[in-house]
Image (spheres, rainbow, N blue to C red):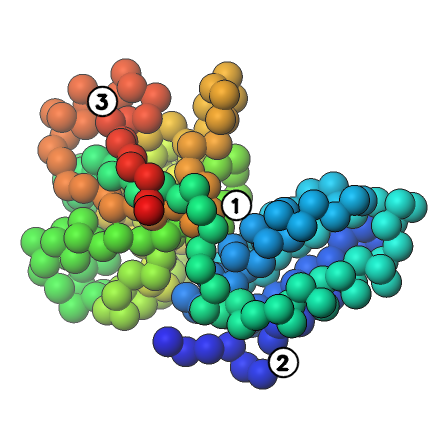
Amino acid sequence: MTYPTPEFPMIRTGGVDGLLISFGDKLSEPANRAALAFRAAVEAEGWDGVEETSSTLVSCFVRFDPLHLPHDVLQAKVETLLKRRNWFDAVLPEGRRFWRIPTVYGTDLAPQLAQAAAAAGMSEAEAVTSLSDARVRVQALGFSPGQPYLGELPEVWDIPRQSQLTDRVPQGALVVAIRQFVLFGVSAPTGWQHVGQTAINLFQPKADEPILLRPGDEVQFIATDAASLNNMRSDPDGGATYEMIK
């Protein structure tokens, strides 16, 4: 593992009511692990005056009521918590799940598989095997409700984003670049390469848990065929199943 440089973790002010605790200046497994574990630790502390926490690829954000919890008091609490352990090798939070999501690779449903495979130096068949065998972590949610960034993929998938945007990929599109997947929660433009298509609905506002995937969950995108995927479209989860990670 490559650990972040010595200036991390770093605490910065995020507006009048936030602290941003960063564990690196670029994505790495240890920095993402630290962000997830530290956010869970802050939640477990239950500090009075903390109103919300969230995590990004390498950071934890803490939003607080500055009239109830002074900034310097919260910063002191955060500094004390940071010193308790090496967060870069912390155990990931409990309650994580391992999802298997049926995915069609290539065909007209995911038309950029061939060019992504070429960029990775693989045949299409080799690319499908590599991508469908990968077990990746939900590193963060962003861009649209419930939309995950997942990784890291093997180094061969450190391929660049496109120089031009694809006008639009559909909801459920699985795209790849820079050793990560993004699973699209809405139809939108992207500079990432569309290699797979799922039937999953990541944001279900009427459900008890509207956001389907959580940071820290693990996912494998299992290869399926177009006919099977079409049959799964009546299921909001798009045929996805999960088991708890012990």
Left or right, 171 with reference to 204: left
Farthest bottom residue in view: 6
Marker disc for residue 142:
1
x and y percentages locating residue 94 in the rendered image? 44, 47
The location of residue 97, given as percent across then percent down, is 35, 41
Quadrant of residue 245 within the rendered picture: top left
Crowding near the residue tagged with mark 1, few <14, some 14–19, many ≥20 C-alpha atoms within 10 Å: few
Relative to residue 134, is residue 99 depicted above or below?
Answer: above
Amino acid on which disc 3 is placed = Met
User: Which residue appears at 29% of the width and 37% of the height?
Assistant: 243
Quadrant in the rendering for residue 110: top left
SS class, disc 3: helix
Q: What's the mark number on residue 14?
A: none
Label 3 vs label 1: CA separation? 25 Å
Numbered badge on residue 7: 2
Question: Three-letter amino acid code at disc 1?
Answer: Gly
At 47% across and 51% down in the image, what residue appears?
Answer: 93
Viewer-closest of 83 and 176: 83
Residue to which mark 3 is pinned:
232
